[in-house]
Amino acid sequence: MKLSMMGVINLIHEADEMEALTANRCLATVPFGGRYRLIDFVLSSMVNSGIPRVAVFAHRKFRSLMDHLGSGSNWDLHRKQSGLFVIPPSMEDQTDFGKGDLYHFYRNRDYFARSTVDYVVIARSHMVCNVDFAKVLEQHRETGADVTVVCKNSPEGMPGLARKAKVNGAGRIVEMQDHFGRLDSDIVSMEMYVLNKELLLDLVDTSLAQGRDHFVRHSILSRLEQLQVHAYMHEGVLGVVNNIAAYYRHSMELLQPDIWRELFFKPGSIYTKVKDEPPTHYRSGADVSHSLIANGCDIEGTVTNSILFRGVKVAKGAVVRNSIVMQNGVVGENGSLENCILDKEVEIRPMQQLKGSIEMPFIALKRKVI
């Protein structure tokens, strides 16, 4: 069933403290979970919820984004039935890169105006979760809210950068602050906003006329008293992944079967770009325990409490512990990794040893030979 809703994945000025992992790619395409990218989670949630049209507002370093998304066929989004649209910033005017997301929405207002749907959900790419937006829209209509924000109650706190919100007894958000604020609340905004399309276009015009060009800060936070902004409380798994500590922690949480099953299959499956790989080859002498291993790996050494992406090679005598090795990584004979994150195609030479800590994992850059 298709919802009367369009999806917008907003990559404009997305909070990013991923350091080396986003040196050559945008945050949305950071590899996660053995074979996925961060954007796969919100995109799959939209598709599974019955949203027929999704626009990705790209910003910087979007080559890998274009390569990953392609025509959208891996998410069953193709132009004949529905559509996936990647909207880049203007290449002619370099000042566009410094402007806020409202400016980019305004520049592409015809995209919104041509759509016949009534509602829009605007989301970020760094929220690792599995959300049913049909239920969010249902609550939005029942409460008569102007804006519904998907939130998560997180008493244990989040290592990533996220806004906190304060909600009254009626479910209305009465206060919200950026991650650096001192708001005393356990409620975290998941940066997913459902509102009427006409209201969005009105907020775009009004805010820009006032010289303000940031959607959340200028259109939502400054109007909490005028608008009915309500919270939808998400009960499932959430990872706010926009810094190294959060990336490492939430990756390691995938080794817990209950978290892995809930994130990837409830309420729907998470999809990604399909790559045909042979099964992993566990050679004689391989010792693998409590790990997540993607297809196409070749393992002869020891892997413990780790995540290996597609095509990783672990040679004889090599040891990988508490680490994340991305696609086509190589750990040479008698090499050693502990508490490390290896980017794509990083090679660890024989006998080399790398060690970080749980609080500060060692990061090896893409295509850098250690």
Image (cartoon, rainbow, N blue to C red):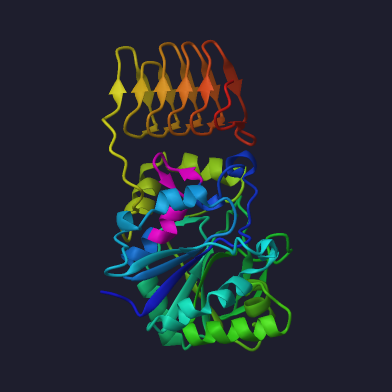
Horizontal relation, residue 157 to residue 198: left or right: right
Q: Quadrant of residue 115?
A: bottom left
Q: Quadrant of residue 248?
A: top right
Q: Is residue 30 visible?
A: yes
Region of the chain picked out in magenta, as a range: 30-43
Question: Where residue 347 sits in the image (x, y, percent)?
Answer: 51, 22
Question: Residue at 35% across / 48% down in the picture?
Answer: 273
Looking at the image, residue 192 lies above or below residue 114: above
Q: How many marks?
A: 0
Question: Where residue 74 sits in the image (x, y, percent)?
Answer: 31, 54
Question: Where residue 349 sits in the image (x, y, percent)?
Answer: 53, 15
Question: Residue at 56% across / 60% down in the picture?
Answer: 11
Question: Toward the viewer: 11 or 314?
Answer: 11
Image quadrant containing the N terminus: bottom left
Looking at the image, residue 199 lies above or below residue 102: below
Q: Is residue 266 magenta?
A: no
Q: Is residue 236 visible?
A: no
Question: Residue at 35% across / 53% down in the picture?
Answer: 270
Looking at the image, residue 267 lies above or below residue 297: below
